[in-house]
Image: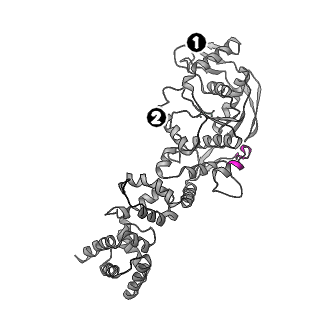
Amino acid sequence: MVRVRFAPSPTGFLHIGGARTALFNWFYAQAQGGKFILRIEDTDAARSRPEYVDEILLSLKWLGFNWDEIYYQSQRFDIYRRYAQQLVSEGKAYVAEKLPDQPAGGQAIILKMLPQQVKLNDLIRGQIEFDTAVIKDQVLIKSDGTPTYNFACVIDDALMQITHVIRGDDHISNTPKQIVLYQALGFAVPEFAHLPLILAKAGGRLSKRKGATAISEYRQMGYLSEALVNFLLLLGWSPGADREIIGLKEAIGLFDIRKVNKTAAVLDLDKLDWINSQYLRAMSPQDLLTVLVPLLAEKGYIEKEKFDSNYVLSLIQLFQSRMSTLHDFVERSDFFFVDQPAMDPAAQEKFLSGDHSREFSLFIRRLEGLADFSPATIEAGFREMAQELGMEAKQLVHPVRVALTGKTVGPGLFELVYYLGKERTKQRLIRWVKREVA
Ligand code: GLU
């Protein structure tokens, strides 16, 4: 049975690169009917933090990558020590008192590196050969008693019966050292698959400035987990025929680890926005309402228990085809929820610096005269008014929109007025009339 693992070090949050590694492991387990194991590599007590562990677990759950087993390396130190001692007694490793680059304390245990050619048949990268003559003797247990990454990793991958090690390209230079360890310990060597590097769109490696954002932040920014997973999947794999949107179920059926790209993937956040917008469009307004309610309540736009859900549903439908993230709705629909929406100063300067008293007053009168208040009648009234004024309707649309919403973009003006309602529309226009007249 296929057994794969994701082995994060909790010295930071789960970032795009780690999430992509987790996805490809989880995905491979799904495709093969195997098991997905989570191993927290918290051997470095000084740098590992419980809050990072919490964030990693939460983010993995949010992404839907449920694990079958979980282990913490910090609870397994005696196991590593036992195997290190076995290697010493077999003459394959030796004990050193004090190493120049090791913390003071007890004794370190070090593996003798014998010269040999190590062959690796990577499932993605193909055949790679390494000459161990260039590799130094390997520390297994440091003098402070903690195991090194390579040693703990091999012991655990062997004891946890990992069949496929799927991880980032940055670990390729560790692989020959690990293969030597498997051999020394008499363990079967698993298959390896090294995922391509992820580069920033601006070039170079991902950094804090270039897209290395924590998954929890993407969540807060209003991306849907399904969309983010779809996006991560394309960082190294493609369902073919230039398809970008693919549901998990279908992708699992098509996935082949051998078809993962060798060349570096580029993190294109515009593509993430686009993918997210496609997922948002495909959602039912009711489902969107469910995910938006907490965000709207947090902003104070609605009260969770008592708000007009039909009204908010209508607003969601106004924006649904124009949103890239959930936050787009929260930010762009503010004028429906607050009395004094924020005014974009550039929009005010451009569209409201002239005198619009006459047009606004006329529009108010038209609205008052409407027996049947609907987007169609509002539009008809607006167009008639423009004709009377000898203006083109579009010259009037922008000033009215800015006066009502504080923004230059948004849903169609007549639907906007309809959902804002006659009274609020009047009040917001009057503000500008008074100002100009006074
Ligand atoms: N803890 C290592 C890391 O986060 C795991 C590498 C591996 O998958 O072997 O990079």
Can you identify the residue that label 2 sits on? 51
Task: Inspect the magenta stretch and tell me whether residue 253 lies in it.
Answer: yes
Q: x and y percent of residue 191 in the render?
A: 73, 34
Q: Is residue 195 visible?
A: no
Instruction: Give whichever of 244, 268 is nearer the camera.
Output: 244
Q: CA distance from mark 2 to mark 1?
A: 35 Å
- Tag 2, which secondary structure? helix
Q: Residues within 10 Å of mark 2 (few under 14, many from 20)?
A: few
Examine the rendered structure and indicate whether residue 388 appears above or below residue 424: below
User: Split into 4 quadrants, where in the image is the C terminus?
Assistant: bottom left
Residue at the (62%, 21%) spot, across then down:
139
136 or 14: nearer the eye? 14
Q: Disc 1 designates what residue?
A: 97
Residue 360, position in %: x, y? 32, 78
Residue 58 sits inside the magenta stretch: no
Give the magenta part as a residue range.
252-262
- Left or right of residue 339: residue 6: right
Q: Residues within 10 Å of mark 1 (few under 14, many from 20)?
A: few
Ligand 1: which quarter? top right
Q: Which is more toward the observer, 77 or 350? A: 77
Amino acid type at image mark 2: Glu
